[in-house]
Image (spheres, rainbow, N blue to C red):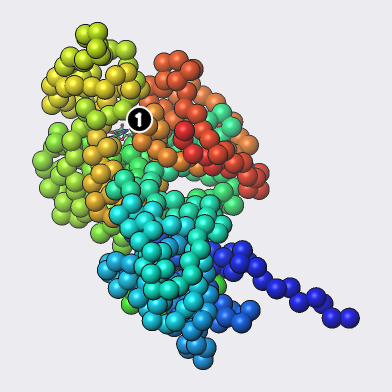
Amino acid sequence: MHPIARTRSDEDYMRLALGLARRGYGLTSPNPMVGAVLVKGGGIIGRGWHHYAGGPHAEIEAIHDAEARGHNPKQATLFVTLEPCCTHGRTPPCTDPIIRAGIKKVVAGATDPNPLHRGKGFKLLQSAGLKVTFGLLADECQGLNEAFNHWIVHRTPLVTVKAAMTLDGKIATASGESKWITGEKARAFAMNLRRGADAILLGINTVLADDPSLTFRGQRSEVRGQKAGVRVQGSGVEDRQPRRIVLDSMARTPLQSKVVTDSSAERTTIVVSPLAPKKRVVALEKKVRVLVAPLQGAEFKVQSSRFKVQGSRGRRSPVQHPASRIQHPKSGIHHPLSAIHHPPSTIREPPSGISLLWLLKTLGSENVTSLLVEGGGEVNASFLLGGLAHRVVFFYAPKVLGGRDSLRAVAGQGVSGSEQALNLSEVQWRRLEDDWLLTARLQ
Ligand SMILES: NC(=O)c1ccc[n+]([C@@H]2O[C@H](COP(=O)([O-])OP(=O)(O)OC[C@H]3O[C@@H](n4cnc5c(N)ncnc54)[C@H](OP(=O)(O)O)[C@@H]3O)[C@@H](O)[C@H]2O)c1
């Protein structure tokens, strides 16, 4: 008896293209991950994916793959996870070679998220006589590039807050010791998050307590099916490491710390405030990049009853910003903020520290599409309670640390009423050995 030959559906081809696209995980930024499959006469004649930014796009790879295998892409159908580009970037537009190759039909998953280009690629192909359908497995195809989709529209990175904690929500003992909270599988998952992130951010207290290296440790070639170093050779992506960002208002990062001295030091940015002692800044600048950022101020989105609203039509008067009354805990210097206008009761945290909104805009302008915030508790709180995080990845170990002074995963001042609690959506739980992993989106 012969097994019944299963004919592949359009969905099957798109799933294959999605699998190919994922091979570019952590390598393509600031470009999206894209996969493509060329089908002719009921069989696959070419496969391609975008390997790295600046390299050929998936559609072109698929055409080349077909030709290299002796197939003619003429009259073939192209399954591609993202609308083919029609503009010149680092590479020429994909629509031209698709048309030139004589492909008769394009089946796309997601449309181009860039509002300036959306739908233009499809129109160009259609006007050249190709049949175009789109929206097949659209959710999966769009979800694949969540960070890119966010960045291309807002020009700031997608922010994910990651923390590994005990069941009572603690990330370190009172003495600051935080090693081995979660098990091996959870740590491997966290490492994979680093692989996909353009930058990792943490607070100075974590640098002082842990002296972390914050590098991706693992083989890029572990990516399923990736021919390590074959096509990506010379592109520099084999040892692509995320950037490391330290929030350090007073430039306290030790000169001998790993982020300053190790082989990835050129990827470290210490973000200091204008209040940082000049001598310290100069010393750090000799080893790593130092960015002088404004202190958190007018733009900070937090909630407070301290702001007065005047006038019956909701006109707001300039009021003294809380930050202007805040002294830096170490320097005792007043923040240089004067009376500023504020949006109505959107304040949740008294502003202090580096302006995160400014930093996000700066990182976005430097092509950082995804930012992984790795704590500690103060920094996590600033992003979460400040309304600047989009996703959380929380690992829970079946342990209890207890302790009045042990450190919490989310510290800060917290919200003043339970009705102001942050609500999570798209919540997913997953078991990782003895640990639990929660991933969710901020509403
Ligand atoms: N288990 C885990 O997943 C995990 C992960 C990370 C850390 N940890 C532990 O957490 C502990 C440190 O946490 P922490 O809460 O004390 O400190 P932190 O979050 O690491 O650092 C907070 C400091 O960052 C600086 N900062 C500058 N701008 C800021 C802003 N906009 N928002 C918040 N902070 C800003 C401030 O110091 P300046 O005023 O001097 O700038 C602030 O005091 C360590 O013991 C570490 O081991 C555990």
Q: Quadrant of residue 344?
A: top left
- Residue 308 is left or right of residue 100, and the answer is left
Q: Residue at image x 40%, y 33%?
A: 384
Which residue occupies 24% across, 30% down? Answer: 299
Q: Residue at x 49, y 83 (%)?
A: 73
**Does ligand 1 reach within 8 Å of label 1's beta carbon?**
yes
Residue under the point 57% across and 65% down:
14
- Quadrant where the N terminus sits is bottom right
Image quarter for residue 312? Answer: top left
Q: Position of residue 392 (x, y in %)?
A: 48, 40
Which of 402 and 323 lies nearest the eye of the viewer?
A: 323
Task: Let me know if residue 325 appears in the view.
Answer: no
Q: Eyeballing the image, is 190 above or below 352?
A: below
- Would you place residue 20 above or below residue 339 in this image? below
Residue found farthest to the right: 1
- Kindly tell me whether residue 423 is visible in this rendering: yes
Q: In the image, what residue type sits under mark 1?
A: Gly
Tell me how many marks there are: 1
Rendered position, 270 above or below 298: below
Q: Quadrant of ligand 1?
A: top left
Q: Position of residue 149 (x, y in %)?
A: 39, 51
Q: In the picture shown, does residue 98 fall above or below 87? A: below
For label 1, the residue is 386
Measured as percent of width and height from the top left, residue 184 is found at: 58, 52
Mark 1 surroundings within 10 Å by alpha-carbon count, few (fewer than 14), some (14 through 19), many (20 or more): many
Q: Nearer the viewer, residue 274 or 399?
A: 274
Residue 140: x and y in percent read: 54, 55
Q: Nearer the viewer, residue 276 or 114?
A: 114
Judged from the image, the secondary structure of the residue bearing numbered disc 1 is loop
